[in-house]
């Protein structure tokens, strides 16, 4: 054990006690990390609030120790947090995110469980070659699917497009930049035809890191936008989408057989 406190996440192994967690729930939004800790964990302890990367330690109902941590938005921030989480002993990471559906049959409010990612992310290229697969851990992913079934949460399993920008990279034109590069015009339709389910901004890099670092990663995202209809976030259904994603991930984390 080392008492090193990691520069970005703001805590170290010594802060995790004698039975440290091996599994982490990782949200983009610090408010989501707090919500998870407050509503789903027992004996919660705030570990750090450094740079908005809030981290909490607590216990699931079955007594399993767990972290609720924050990646921030996008792959560069996620890559720093994940690197440091692995250094404090984390071996399984479930990303709990939000996403935009690009398939008409995947509605707002439902969840997407990613079995792999189309990784169009610069940070991932510092970790592995562009051709390196961005694949979710099959066992952790099955645990998510099982959890969604048991909780009767409407869920879809498939490929997620992970990109670096919310606006240009996801072909949004109703923004400060209406001048999309030619290469991005029609990209959403192309992905639809390739059976990609959704857009978000972290899974691809997370999955590649898992392959290289040898930890298990999976992802569940609540659908908060329906891109076949509109560019906007459907705020009226954001809370239910997130609630569904959190409940599914927490259930899976409790039932997953730890190595
Ligand atoms: O809700 P989170 O987990 O942040 O995930 C999604 O939301 C952010 C964009 O709004 C990006 O980080 C994207 O991946
Ligand atoms: O459309 C969306 C919604 C959430 N997160 C994204 O990256 N895109």
Image (spheres, rainbow, N blue to C red):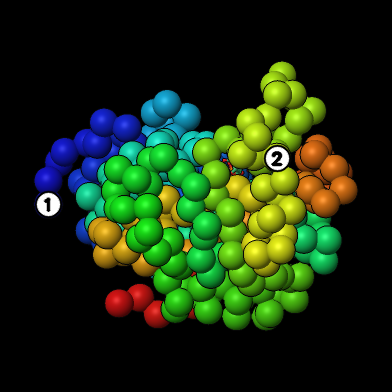
Numbered disc total:
2
In the depicted view, which residue is nearer to us: 202 or 239?
Answer: 202
The residue sitting at 29% across, 38% down in the picture is 11
Q: Position of residue 217 (x, y in %)?
A: 42, 63
In the depicted view, which residue is nearer to us: 118 or 44?
Answer: 118
In the depicted view, which residue is nearer to us: 234 or 249?
Answer: 234
Vertical side of 212 occupied by 70: above or below: above
Residue 71 in view of the camera: no
Q: Earlier in the sequence, mark 1 or mark 2?
A: 1
Q: Position of residue 235 (x, y in %)?
A: 82, 40
Disc 2 under 8 Å from ligand 2? The reply is no
Residue 186 in view of the camera: yes
In the picture of the structure, the residue carrying the numbered disc 1 is 1
Left or right, 22 with reference to 53: left
Vertical side of 6 occupied by 209: above or below: below
- Mark 2: few, some, or many residues within 10 Å (few <14, many ≥20)? some
In the picture of the structure, the residue carrying the numbered disc 2 is 185
The residue sitting at 63% across, 31% down in the picture is 181
**Res. 81 image quadrant:** top left
Label 1: which secondary element: loop
Q: Position of residue 244 (x, y in %)?
A: 70, 61
């Amino acid at each position: 054990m080392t008492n090193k406190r990691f520069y970005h996440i703001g805590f170290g192994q010594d802060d995790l006690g004698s039975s440290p967690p091996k599994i982490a729930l990782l949200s983009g939004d610090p408010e989501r990390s707090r919500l998870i800790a407050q509503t789903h964990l027992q004996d919660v302890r705030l570990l750090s609030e450094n740079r908005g990367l809030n981290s909490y330690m607590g216990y699931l109902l079955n007594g399993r120790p767990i972290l609720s941590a924050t990646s921030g938005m996008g792959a560069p921030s996620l890559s720093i947090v994940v690197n440091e989480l692995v250094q404090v002993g984390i071996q399984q990471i479930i990303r709990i995110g939000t996403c935009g559906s690009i398939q008409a049959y995947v509605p707002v409010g439902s969840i997407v469980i990613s079995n792999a990612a189309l990784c169009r992310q610069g940070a991932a290229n510092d970790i592995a070659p562009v051709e390196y697969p961005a694949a979710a851990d099959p066992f952790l992913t099955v645990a998510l699917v099982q959890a969604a079934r048991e909780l009767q949460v409407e869920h879809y399993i498939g490929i997620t497009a992970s990109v670096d920008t919310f606006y240009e990279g996801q072909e949004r034109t109703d923004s400060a930049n209406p001048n999309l590069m030619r290469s991005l015009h029609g990209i959403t339709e192309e992905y639809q035809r390739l059976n990609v389910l959704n857009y978000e901004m972290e899974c691809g890099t997370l999955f590649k890191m898992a392959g290289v670092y040898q930890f298990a990663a999976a992802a569940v995202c609540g659908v908060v936008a329906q891109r076949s209809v509109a560019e906007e976030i459907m705020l009226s259904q954001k809370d239910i989408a997130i609630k569904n994603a959190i409940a599914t991930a927490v259930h899976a984390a409790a039932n997953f057989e730890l190595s």
